[in-house]
Amino acid sequence: MRTWQVERRKRTRHLIELGGLIVKAGIVELTGGDRVMIFGALLWMADKLNSEDGERARKLWAAKGKRTFEPD
């Protein structure tokens, strides 16, 4: 398999995993799958991360995500 094919598959897998996180978080269900609303929320998140409060948001969101992935 060629290098570009391997890289493309890696990228595709990564994108699928990110989409899975949106589903796992319940975002699709909560928004009725409204892509415009989901994209708006992601843009809001990016603005928050680029703000002076970004580091605090990173720590809070990372901790919440980590708790979710930990076994019960």
Image (spheres, grey):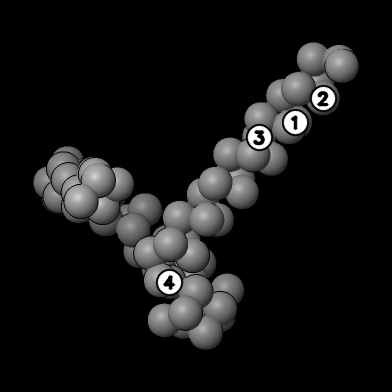
Of mark 3 and mark 2, the one earlier in the sequence is: 2
Label 3 amino acid?
Arg
* Image quarter of the N terminus: top right
Mark 4 falls on what kind of element?
helix
Q: Mark 1 points at which residue?
A: 8
Answer whether residue 27 is visible to the viewer in this image.
yes
Tell me the crowding category of disc 4: few under 14, some 14 to 19, or many 20 or more residues within 10 angstroms, Cα based: some
Disc sitting over residue 11 in the figure: 3
Residue 41 at x, y percent in the picture: 40, 68
Residue at 49% in and 65% down: 23
Disc sitting over residue 20 in the figure: none
Label 1 amino acid?
Arg
Q: Name the residue under label 4.
A: 27
Q: In this view, does 37 lie above or below 12?
A: below
Mark 1 falls on what kind of element?
helix
Answer whether residue 52 is visible to the viewer in this image.
no
- Kindly report the distance in space between the C-alpha atoms of the residues bearing marks 3 and 2: 10 Å
Mark 3 falls on what kind of element?
helix
Q: In this view, does 27 lie above or below 66?
A: below
Q: Nearer the viewer, residue 48 or 60?
A: 60
Q: In this view, does 67 lie to the left or right of 14?
A: left
Tell me the crowding category of disc 3: few under 14, some 14 to 19, or many 20 or more residues within 10 angstroms, Cα based: few
Disc sitting over residue 5 in the figure: 2
Q: Which of 48 and 28 is in front in this view?
A: 28
Residue 24 at x, y percent in the picture: 43, 62
Residue at 49% in and 74% down: 28
Asked if labels 1 and 2 touch by Cβ distance under 8 angstroms, the answer is yes
Residue at 37% in and 53% down: 46
Mark 2 falls on what kind of element?
helix
Label 4 amino acid?
Ile
Q: How many numbered marks have been drawn onto this rendered protein structure?
A: 4
Asked if labels 1 and 3 touch by Cβ distance under 8 angstroms, the answer is yes
